[in-house]
Image: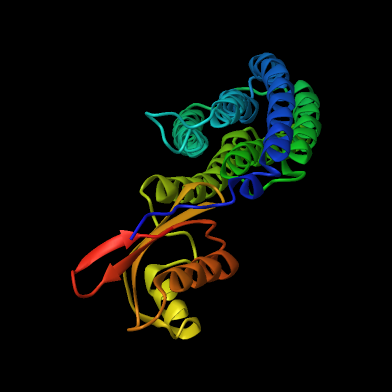
């Protein structure tokens, strides 16, 4: 039996360029805002002697790198597939999300180390300049976060960038609280204490992002789309199937799920009709638009791909 492999790729990607272009613009604008304020925060942190500000500035430096990487990932991801990379460069975006998570872990370690040093030997902090810079930082981060969460906020790359900025938002709030406490009570240990609190909040976000991006890179099954669930559903919905096996399901990038499997139609059933029914169920129930379904021929023990 001949092979046929038909998918409505135009339909699949009809909105992709528009969404991708919008994401690209958002990330580029967020990068310039973050980078510009990071420079201001370094100056403010050194001037006031605040670890909370310097920690936030260090985090904003990684944010700038993360946003630049995210922008680069969108540019690379738009490239067409070629003979060497048959799925194109879409996975580059997931790699960017993974690197973002790693950089968050690194910055947390740095903040905790610096905070420990401050506990050992407290340093004077100028509360006035610290407060001014922290408030300006908070406003900048709110604007950047708002830009990023509009539209396609579930994209792993946008989510990675937004998590970085969320960490900065918390850092700015921490710096404001620390500045107010130092201003009214002159109790400087609040500065490293709040730095540690922010570091732990960042750590939680970093772990979630690391898990999600690593799962995609390891070809893990998307949430709620396990092979056993797919098999159970197909047996239930398509009575013309005798057996389903060798099911593999994975994501190329965020929101793009692929699957391969072998199906054996019941005696006398038309293989092509069975395969089309399987494709329809995969698309409608599990949002799997790109499936390769092979038919098992029981007599020969051979299989032939029909989709």
The image quadrant that residue 76 belongs to is: top right
Residue 82 sits in which quadrant?
top left
Horizontal side of 34 relative to 268 (left or right) equals: right
The residue nearer to you, when weighing 26 against 305, is 305
Residue 73 pos. (x, y %): 55, 29
Q: Is residue 1 above or below residue 94?
A: below
In screen coordinates, is 174 left or right of 132?
A: left
Which quadrant, please, contains the N terminus? bottom left
Q: Is residue 128 above or below residue 281?
A: above
Task: Provide residue 195's location: percent of width, then percent of height.
Answer: 58, 37
The colour mode here is rainbow
Q: Nearer the viewer, residue 90 or 175?
A: 90
Which residue is more in the foreground, 169 or 10? 10
Of the 4 image quadrants, the one containing the C terminus is bottom left
What residue is shown at x 71% (from left), y 32% (from top)?
21
- Give the residue at the far left of this rendering: 300
Is residue 279 in sight in this rendering?
Answer: yes
| Above or below, 257 relative to 91 | below
Residue 218: x %, y % from top left: 36, 48
Q: Residue at x 72, y 20 (%)?
A: 32
Q: Position of residue 197 (x, y in %)?
A: 57, 45
Residue name at image x 62 percent, y 49 percent: 12
Relative to 12, 251 lies left or right: left
**Residue 246 in view of the camera:** no
């Amino acid at each position: 039996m001949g092979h046929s492999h038909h998918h409505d790729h135009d339909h699949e990607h009809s909105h992709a360029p528009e969404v991708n272009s919008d994401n690209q613009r958002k990330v580029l604008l967020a990068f310039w805002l973050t980078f510009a304020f990071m420079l201001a925060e370094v100056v403010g942190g050194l001037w006031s002697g605040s670890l909370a500000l310097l920690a936030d500035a260090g985090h904003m430096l990684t944010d700038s790198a993360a946003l630049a990487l995210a922008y680069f990932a969108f540019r690379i991801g738009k490239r067409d597939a070629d003979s060497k990379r048959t799925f194109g460069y879409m996975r580059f975006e997931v790699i960017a999300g993974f690197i973002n998570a790693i950089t968050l872990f690194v910055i947390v370690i740095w903040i905790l180390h610096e905070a420990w040093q401050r506990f050992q030997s407290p340093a004077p902090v100028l509360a006035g300049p610290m407060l001014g810079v922290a408030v300006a930082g908070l406003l900048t981060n709110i604007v950047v976060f708002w830009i990023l969460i509009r539209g396609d906020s579930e994209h792993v790359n946008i989510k990675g960038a937004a998590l970085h900025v969320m960490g900065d938002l918390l850092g700015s709030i921490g710096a404001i609280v620390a500045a107010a406490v130092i201003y009214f009570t002159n109790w400087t240990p609040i500065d490293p204490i709040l730095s540690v609190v922010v570091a732990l909040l960042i750590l939680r976000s970093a772990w979630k992002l690391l898990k999600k991006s690593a799962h995609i890179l390891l070809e893990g099954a998307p949430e709620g789309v396990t092979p056993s669930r797919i098999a159970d559903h197909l047996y239930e919905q398509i009575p013309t199937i005798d057996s389903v096996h060798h099911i593999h399901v994975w994501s190329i990038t965020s929101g793009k799920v692929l699957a391969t499997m072998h199906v054996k139609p019941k005696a006398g059933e038309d293989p092509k009709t069975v395969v089309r029914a399987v494709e329809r169920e995969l698309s409608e129930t599990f949002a799997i638009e790109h499936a390769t379904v092979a038919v098992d021929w029981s007599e020969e023990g051979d299989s032939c791909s029909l989709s």
